[in-house]
Image: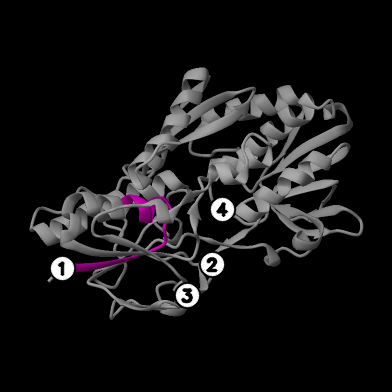
Amino acid sequence: MKARVVVLGAGFGGLELTTMLSEEFGEGIDVALIDKGEAFVFGFSKLDVMFGRRTPEQVRHYYHDMMKPGVRFVRTTARAIDPEAKRVVTDAGTFEADVLVVALGADLEPEATPGLLEGGHEFYSGEGAFALRDAIARFERGPAIVGVTGKSFKCPPAPSETALLLHDYLTARGRRQTTEIAVVMPFGVPIPPSPESSQAILAAFADRGIRFVKDTLVKALDPARKIAVLSDGSEMPYELFLGVPVHRVPQVVVESGLAADKYAWVPVNKQTLETRFPGVYAVGDVNGVGTPKAGVFAEGSAKVVGKAIIAQLRGGPAPEAYNGRGSCYLEFGGEQVARVDVQFLAGPKPVGSYQPPSQALVAEKKEFGASRVRRWFGNGW
């Protein structure tokens, strides 16, 4: 009888895990990959659409294009998860598993910030980022704020990248002198684990006249006055607000008992990514392992879980412990890309290194995306 693996979520973690299992077992395994969406979009592609470098259709990779032996993609919504029974109830029926992997990511909660929906824009969902393409095109004068509204959020470099790309966009259109740009973040520096990366970003901000407001969150917007209210009680005027919404655990995960509440990420064994329920794993943004909420870390944790499942079914040794290693590309504008390499779990504190912006890293970033598309979907980009 084929082993049954149910994977909830078709992001970096779900796509990498199902690819590994298909490569190892082919038709000898029964893998159900479940996601409510129709297409995968890289996080960095949202910025490409926002600033007019690509169209929405150019950055979508449709799940129906996947052809993986042993894997079936089911587009549906998970309504209930029973981690003890390893059972998932969806709109398309009930799925029973021998191994259950929760890779549902982090949900966005823009309504948690008063005024954000009425007076600002969020750019972390595909819909929000794509809609901003027109809003940014209309922005001609006044202050723009790139503001973080919650302490835990996906891709920590993204707010800084957005500010730098907005500077380029406005400069190219002759609007930069009539506008202001500020970044509001809950950290003392843009990328705390990598001081060298933070120094480079702050230098780029200073060179471009971008204000960095540190150790602060945007707690509310007053759309009538066009004011952003910060966590220290101070206020900042804005004409254009680009917000990073509060992130939360998906409700179906909270109701399953895997998470204590909507802001408590799923606790896992940091070495294996297994939850307190045997045979149930949480990979990527949904877990609380301590790495950034970014696709490359979801992919890395999925590889550990994939190797564990293969070892379990093949009878081999357990894989090495998850080390929380990952690399993130940083858009500096001017068609330049840098890279930060960070390892979070191999020592007493995170350690990061930095590669400065170069054209070579532009090509490397492009190949990073293209190689994943080839691996996960079997086609080029």
SS category of the residue bearing label 2:
loop
Q: From the viewer's perspective, is 73 left or right of 186?
A: left
Alpha carbon of mark 1 to alpha carbon of mark 2: how far?
Answer: 36 Å
Q: Amino acid at mark 4?
A: Phe
Judged by depth in the image, the label closer to the viewer, 3 or 4, is 3
Kind of residue sitting beneath label 2:
Tyr
Give the extent of the magenta segment.
3-16
At which x and y percent is residue 80? 43, 79
What residue would you read off at disc 1? 2
| Label 1 or label 3, whichever comes before in sequence order | 1
Is the Cβ of the residue at disc 2 closer than 8 Å to that at disc 4? Answer: no
User: In the current view of this chain or complex, which residue is farthest to the right?
Assistant: 225
Q: Which residue is mark 2?
A: 263
Mark 3 closeness class: few <14, some 14–19, many ≥20 residues within 10 Å: some
Question: How far is mark 2 from mark 4, CA to CA?
Answer: 11 Å
**Badge 4: residue crowd in 10 Å (few <14, some 14–19, many ≥20):** many
Comparing labels 1 and 2, the label whose residue is closer to the camera = 1
Kind of residue indicated by mark 1? Lys
Gap in Å between the C-alphas at discs 1 and 3?
Answer: 27 Å
* Nearer to us in this view, 217 or 375: 375
Q: Rounded to the nearest whole Å, what is the CA distance between mark 3 and mark 4?
A: 19 Å
Residue at image coords 83%, 42%: 138
Residue ID for mark 3: 252
